[in-house]
Amino acid sequence: MKRESLLLVTGLAFLACTRPEVEAFRRNPTPITVRMTIPADIPQGEDVRKEYAAALQAKLATRVVVVPEGVQGPTDTAVLDVAITDVKRYRSGPNPAAVGVATGLAVGILSAASGNRNAAFDGFWWGMFAAHHAVHARRAELDRLGYRPLDVTAIVYLRPAGGASARSAPLAEFDVGGDEVIDAMDPLSRREADDVGRIREEEARAFARVVIAKLQERFGWSAHGSPTFYRAPGQKTPEEYAEPSSKPAEQVPAESTAVPPHL
């Protein structure tokens, strides 16, 4: 009984802290467009941006209506603003040496503060232990994946309609860490691990999984069947563009080559 009461109080406190516009968007989300940016100095940055944006749009469209890139959405369209802050070709963290030094200093300082005469030795030993553990953790992770992934970090804002460039508070704001994305990646077969395009595809999908999981945590949107994309009134679907016209082609009479009779 106490547990149920605690959960009820926690839930009421959460709702009380939620802004009205956030709660309204949670209950009735408007169409969302994805706007993704990437630093100009990233090698092949535009290719990475397009791959990540496409994967995020496809995953987001299983929760809400998504406005495709380049399509003018309705006036109540919200913006999922994704700013990729850094992309490393190979994963650089956690750096084993940095982990060892940081751990050693922390242990040494604490030991010295407690009056331990062997503080320096304790710091050295624990620093070596932490660095050794970091090396093995990195190797185990790379062995699990079968490839060396990109390390991508980003900042995400979900902005309400009309708030894309204004100072209005975002509906949601969170960071995406490289470790989170790498943990969300699926391993590839030995043949796929040699395919650069396949690796980038999995990296983009993992990034989308993390972003959607964070949005899911905040808004509780459940996944529906197939992806849903916004279509303007009168706009054809790609399938309709591909279908041949049902109207028969107008027959143009062939020119007559017969010699007219002489009167």
Image: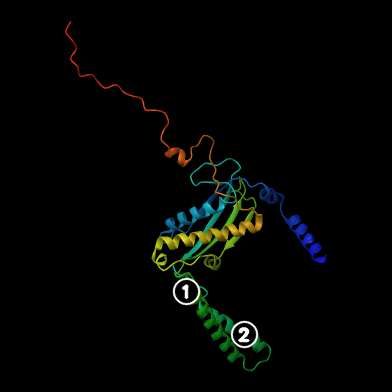
- Residue 178 is situated, as x and y percent measured from the top left of the image, at 53, 66
Question: Distance from label 2 to label 1 (Cα)?
Answer: 31 Å
> Along the line of sight, which residue is nearer the eye, 25 or 175?
25
* Residue where numbered disc 1 is placed: 143
Badge 2 amino acid: Val
* Residue where numbered disc 2 is placed: 107
The N terminus appears in which quarter of the rendering? bottom right
Q: Is residue 179 above or below residue 213?
A: below
Q: Classify mark 2: residues with Cα within 10 Å, few (<14), some (14-19) or many (20+).
A: many
- Residue 155 is situated, as x and y percent measured from the top left of the image, at 56, 60
Quarter of the view holding residue 120: bottom right
- Residue 218 is situated, as x and y percent measured from the top left of the image, at 66, 57
Residue 242 located left or right of residue 155: left
Res 165 visible: no
- Colour scheme of the picture: rainbow
Q: Helix, strand or loop at disc 2?
A: helix
> Along the line of sight, which residue is nearer the eye, 145 or 34?
145
Q: Is residue 248 above or below residue 96?
A: above
Q: Helix, strand or loop at disc 1?
A: helix
Residue in the image at 52% along x and 52% along y = 58
Q: Earlier in the sequence, mark 2 or mark 1?
A: 2
Which label sits in the foreground, 2 or 1?
Answer: 1
Which labelled disc corresponds to residue 10? none
Quarter of the view holding residue 219: bottom right
Residue furthest right in the image: 1
Quarter of the view holding residue 193: bottom left
Badge 1 amino acid: Asp
Residue in the image at 66% along x and 92% along y = 116
